Amino acid sequence: MATVLCTNGLLSKTLAVVRSMGKHGIRTVVGEKTRYHASGFSKYADKTVVYPDPKRYPEQFYDWLYETIIREKVDFLFPMDDDVMDVVVLKQEELKKLCRIPVPSLESYRVAADKSLTMRLAEDRNVPYPRTAETSFGPQFNPDELLAVTAAMDYPLCIKPRVGSGSRGVRFANDAAELVSLFQEIHRSYPNPLIQEAVSFGGKYGVCLCYDSNHTVRAAFVQKEVRNFPEERGPSVVQESIYDEKMLDYTKRLMDGIPWFGVVEVDYMVDSRTGEPKLMEINPRYWASLNLAVVSGVDFPWMHYQLGMEADADSMLTYKAGVFSRQLLPGDLLYFLTSKRRWRLDPPFFTAKSKDDIISRDDPWPTVGFLVSALRYCLDLKMWKFIITR
């Protein structure tokens, strides 16, 4: 029996991978910085392991990963989030001597992970994106220079870290004074953030793809974000499967500029004034709402595994549209409790129409695992901020 190692067990997307692998008879080991996480409680998780924080201690994490792959006889590695991907992509040549790791080259990964480089790629590939300004301040910040590079831009302006995901570090400035103040605040934690004209909100969408080693699309899926927490600009908590050929074509055109191997998600926001989708970012790894693709008929983890193991695999390019999935805990619950439209939601909050990312009759214990982890971290404000802004 083959063995896979999945990282970032706290995240619901990792649970989707664990369930997919288990249903295909693959031995699954799940890792996280703690033993308390939903994925580790799944009946499809054969073993849980604890690792050093990849972000704070990347070298120690790499040593742990190397030793664990050997000890557990791992055949395939699923690096599930940015902190682990950063280490794995950098060290992939050494790790590929131990197991299969279908990830992009370091060069392609850096372009996808850095929003500034992503927007330059969009310019080259003729993919629409918001008007963007870059900065290159050293230790000395110059407000006049900041206002000069943004002089031709229309407010409100969005300030966002060049590297990162979710809504962490993203702020909006309505005038020049606010721009200078917010930019300095973000610049201290995320040097030289990107500045973009805020897109008039007309809906958020994601295009999800899986490429083989020949850089050919073997699985494709498009989703619409139905509800977000915080509203509009926050991460999605309810999504719907759809087809959208324009965004799919834009994404293929974009990704053709950086040879890719493995999974990727590309985010768009539709401009309500023009109806045109604008590129927001490339997520060079698995995305939070992975479960929706799986329940709609595109099992990305299984495709990813087969391609990495060089097995014969039929492409997954069609799926059922109109399927809903949600993250009840904690995202959609928080949305319901804070929204003025709570009794006019579509789909309704109290409905069996939406498939849940965690709650499952077939595999009920991850719900308990989530609650245990919530109790474990109930007083950890940094952890709750991470979960909510994911």
Image (cartoon, grey):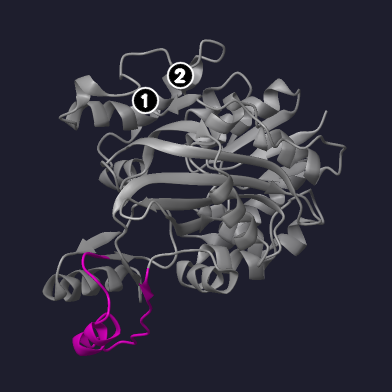
Residue closer to the observer: 4 or 67: 4
Q: Earlier in the sequence, mark 2 or mark 1?
A: 1
Quadrant that contains the N terminus: top right
Disc 1 is placed on an element classified as helix
* Circles 2, 1 touching at the beta carbon (< 8 Å): yes
Identify whether 249 is placed above or below 6.
below
Residue 35 visible to an observer of this rendering = no
Q: Residue at x 66, y 37 (%)?
A: 300
- The amino acid at mark 2 is Ile
- Asked whether residue 145 is drawn in magenta, I would say yes
For label 1, count other residues whose C-alpha is less than 10 Å away and answer few (under 14), some (14-19) or many (20+). many
Q: Residue at x 33, y 55 (%)?
A: 168
- The x, y position of residue 235, in whole percent, is 36, 43
- The x, y position of residue 363, in whole percent, is 55, 15
Tell me the residue that label 2 is attached to.
359
Identify whether 390 is placed above or below 36.
below
- The x, y position of residue 34, in whole percent, is 47, 38
Query: Along the horizontal axis of the image, is 225 left or right of 309?
Result: left
Tell me the residue that label 1 is attached to.
328
Q: CA distance from mark 2 to mark 1?
A: 8 Å
Quarter of the rendering containing residue 156: bottom left
- Asked whether residue 59 is drawn in magenta, I would say no
Query: Along the horizontal axis of the image, is 179 left or right of 245?
Result: left
Disc 2 is placed on an element classified as loop
Q: Which residues are magenta?
A: 131-157
Quadrant that contains the C terminus: top left
Number of marks drawn? 2
Identify whether 249 is placed above or below 44.
below
What number is the disc on residue 211?
Answer: none
Query: Along the horizontal axis of the image, is 168 left or right of 61?
Result: left
Q: Residue at x 45, y 24 (%)?
A: 369
Residue 178 visible to an observer of this rendering = yes
